[in-house]
Amino acid sequence: MTRFRQVLAVRGMTPLLSIALLARAAITADAIALTMYVVLALDLSYAAAGAVAAALTAGVALGGPLLGRMIDRRGLRTVLLVTIVPQFVFWLAVPALPYVILLGASFVAGLLMVPVQPVTRQAIAAMTTAEQRRAAFALESVMGELSYMAGPAVVILFAAKASPGVVAWGVGAAIVLGGVGIALLNPPLRAEDEVAGEAADRPRRREWLGTRMIAVLTMGFGVAMLLSGVDLAIIATLEEAGQVSWAAVVVAVFGVTSVAGGLVYGTLSRPMATWLLLGLLGLVTIPAGLAHDWPWLSVAVIGAGLLTAPTLSTVSDAVSRLAPAGVRGEATGLQSSAQSAGFALGAPVVGVAIDVSGPAGGFAAAGLAGLLAALTGYLLSRRAPASSPRALEPSAPAR
């Protein structure tokens, strides 16, 4: 654990990760909070609730690179002000909004979501050395897993005790507090050795958004699509077995093993290529479809869990290395958009596979999506010219 102690010893790293954990837990639960409000408070269908969640997700996907570009040009605190105020207004107003207005407002709220995840990744790249970066991004992925485990669970728990409107206020308050905390902390987004002239110079998009970056973004999309599909396949498997109430246990096993995998990966002396980790993740996901009850399914998802956080961390690390300092905000925004799109597409694609061939087909579809993204990423990275900046090879620290 020496590597993690070194990372946490970096000035400002511990408060940054702590604030990010709070805000990310709320952001992972925002769609669930809106879904419960539409279904329970407005007494509308799940289809109507899904449209609101989709509008929010679409806004996040479109807003990521735009906010990132604004960070590169205007600075962190300006963007936080532009996003914190709309979030405060939106979540405060949710219980008073009729459905049609809520639908449009959710898209705007997604478009102007506080960019906690991209900012955290930029700050990690700026605050750590090359030797520390793999452990730092592994730790960031672990924080992400903890937020996915805690956020939705807390929202569902409180929804049973309080009104959906109050739950929405709580989610909004956590997002706003997270944004305010990051603004007060004001972490550096460029390393000291990135000279002012180079950092201020914005290279043309075609100079950095090349084959290697597209390869990494494709793999980020693929891992998100796989994870979204696995969640749905777990529920479908347990529903078929009449054991839906055990879904929380299986998801918890998946999350805990992902945390363990991230912690172990961060301590390894040699990194692994992103395409290799994603390919292995896809391979171990497919056999999970052979499990037909919750105990065996809990065992079956361990392999995928162990590889999840390491795969996510290598994507983040690769983006930070391939993006020049002057466009790192836009690049991390594109990464968040690619992953948001993967999460949005994974469930419907895997859902079709489940309808056609059962839960086993869902796991197979999710695993194949990961394998296809890994293969595409590998082929694209091999086609990139040798002069491409910051090559995406495992010999570099933290791939």
Image (cartoon, rainbow, N blue to C red):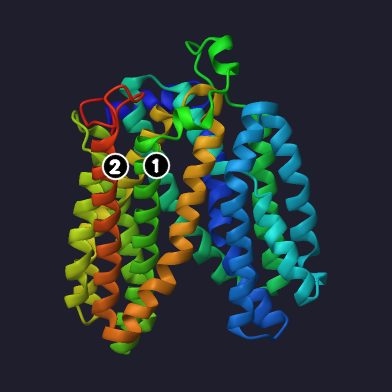
Residue occupying image coordinates x 33% and y 67%:
230
Q: Amino acid at mark 2?
A: Leu
Q: What crowding class fits label 1: few (fewer than 14 Cα within 10 Å), some (14-19), or many (20 or more)? A: some
| Residue 285 position within the rendered picture, expressed as x and y whole percent measured from the top left | 23, 64
| Residue 174 position within the rendered picture, expressed as x and y whole percent measured from the top left | 65, 51
Residue occupying image coordinates x 73% and y 82%:
42
89 lies left or right of 315: right
Task: Looking at the image, tell me whether mark 1 or mark 2 is earlier in sequence order.
Answer: 1
Mark 1 and 2 residues: CB-CB less than 8 Å, in contact?
A: yes
Q: What crowding class fits label 2: few (fewer than 14 Cα within 10 Å), some (14-19), or many (20 or more)? A: some
Question: Is residue 18 depicted above or below 72 in this figure?
Answer: below
Q: Please identify the quarter of the rendering in which residue 355 is found.
A: bottom left
Question: Is residue 335 depicted above or below 95 in this figure?
Answer: above
Residue occupying image coordinates x 48% and y 58%:
341
Q: Please identify the quarter of the rendering in which residue 394 is found.
A: top left
Residue indicated by mark 1: 214
| Residue 344 position within the rendered picture, expressed as x and y whole percent measured from the top left | 48, 64
Q: Amino acid at mark 1?
A: Ile
238 lies left or right of 207: left
Question: Is residue 92 depicted above or below 278 in this figure?
Answer: below
Numbered tag placed on residue 58 in the rendering:
none
